[in-house]
């Protein structure tokens, strides 16, 4: 028993202390900030704060207090949204990246729930689910050691390896992979073990193409629903892909394949069910970018 426990502890320690390139962590900072800025500039959270009170009927008082949401405070939130945008730009170009990531993460924690709280009671979906936590992780890490403008004294080569870069990058990568793993858990909780059956997939393909106002690609899904064998294959592939997603964290060699499969998965759900996940392209954070700064032999 003791030998087994020591082996587990050693594996866990090796996982978190494994060195990572400074450039990979810096690219994670840039991509997370770019994604956040894209979402932030495509929304008007200040206007959402000023919607009539009836839209807040499903938002509990606890949720409002937790995220410091004050309906009607649109002017303040417009200012906060502007500050968040400037902080994200600073994080992208590498100006005081720790401060910029921290400020952006705190402000997005407050702003992000606006969109979802008027749709549902849970403020944990739609657009900026990952960004606040990822930015705070990056703020606690030396993500500005590479690809940054200021301060100059902390610059490092992108190829420099250190465990200080590894733990933060793995935490952010785990957030991305969690999208798929928790999606698998949620499917079982809501629907049961037969979620991926041919009959269920036929229903999903038809149901997600019923709303004429939101459907953009309305022909491929219903056409595929005619073939039970195809629906069954899609269901099995989806179940395997989502339940096996944690392997992308623990098995480094699988990451490139996982990224390709994830992108194909999202393109497929968009074309057949009109489901778009804004965090989709953050899957590239699993890739090793060292080829981009490696000197030719």
Image: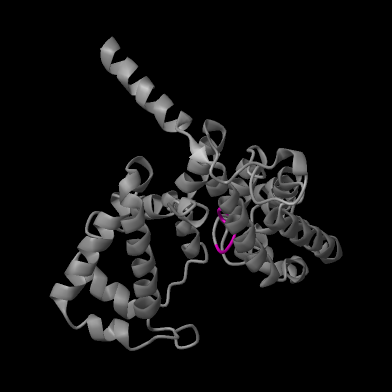
In percent of the image, x 36 and y 72: which residue is there?
269
How far across and how far down the image is residue 195, in percent?
Answer: 26, 61
Could one spot residue 263 in this view of the protein? yes
Q: Is residue 123 magenta?
A: no
Which residue reaches farthest top? 2
Asked if the magenta segment contains residue 127, the reply would be: yes
| Residue positioned most to the front | 297
The x, y position of residue 122, in whole percent, is: 56, 55
Asked which quadrant contains residue 241, the reply is bottom left
* Most foreground residue, 48 or 100: 100
Q: Main secondary structure of the magenta part?
A: loop
Please identify the quarter of the rendering in which residue 184 is found. Answer: bottom left
Horizontally, residue 197 falls left or right of residue 219, namely left
Labels in figure, total: 0
Which residue occupies the foreground of this view, 280 or 123?
280
159 shown above or below 242: above
| 241 w.r.t. 155: above or below | below
Bounds of the magenta span?
A: 126-130
Foreground pick, 210 / 266: 266
- Where is residue 99? Give x, y as percent: 76, 44
Apparent side of residue 2 relative to residue 139 in the rendered image (left or right): left
Q: Residue at x 41, y 32 (%)?
A: 15
Residue 196 visible, this orientation: no
Q: Quadrant of the N terminus?
A: top left
Nearer-the-camera pick, 57 or 239 = 239
């Amino acid at each position: 028993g003791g030998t087994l426990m020591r082996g587990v502890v050693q594996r866990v320690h090796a996982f978190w202390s494994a060195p990572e390139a400074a450039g990979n962590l810096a690219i994670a900072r840039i991509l997370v900030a770019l994604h956040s800025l894209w979402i932030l500039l495509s929304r008007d959270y200040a206007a959402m704060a000023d919607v009539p009170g009836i839209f807040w009927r499903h938002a509990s008082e606890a949720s409002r207090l937790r995220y410091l949401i004050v309906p009607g405070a649109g002017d303040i939130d417009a200012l906060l949204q502007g500050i968040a945008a400037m902080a994200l730009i600073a994080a992208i170009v590498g100006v005081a990246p720790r401060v910029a990531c921290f400020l952006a993460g705190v402000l997005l924690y407050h702003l992000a729930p606006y969109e979802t709280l008027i749709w549902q009671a849970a403020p944990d979906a739609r657009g900026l689910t990952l960004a606040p936590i990822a930015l705070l992780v990056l703020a606690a890490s030396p993500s500005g050691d590479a690809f940054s403008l200021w301060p100059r004294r902390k610059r490092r080569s992108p190829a420099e390896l250190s465990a200080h870069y590894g733990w933060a990058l793995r935490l952010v990568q785990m957030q991305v992979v969690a999208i798929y793993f928790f999606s698998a858990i949620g499917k079982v909780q809501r629907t049961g073990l037969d979620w991926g059956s041919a009959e269920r997939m036929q229903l999903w393909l038809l149901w997600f193409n019923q709303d004429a106002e939101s459907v953009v690609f309305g022909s491929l899904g219903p056409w595929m629903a005619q073939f039970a064998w195809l629906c069954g294959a899609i269901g099995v592939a989806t179940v395997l892909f989502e339940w096996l997603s944690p392997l992308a964290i623990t098995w480094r060699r699988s990451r490139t394949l996982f990224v390709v499969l994830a992108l194909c998965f999202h393109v497929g759900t968009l074309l057949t069910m009109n489901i778009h996940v804004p965090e989709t392209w953050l899957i590239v954070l699993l890739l090793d970018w060292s080829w981009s700064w490696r000197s030719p032999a």
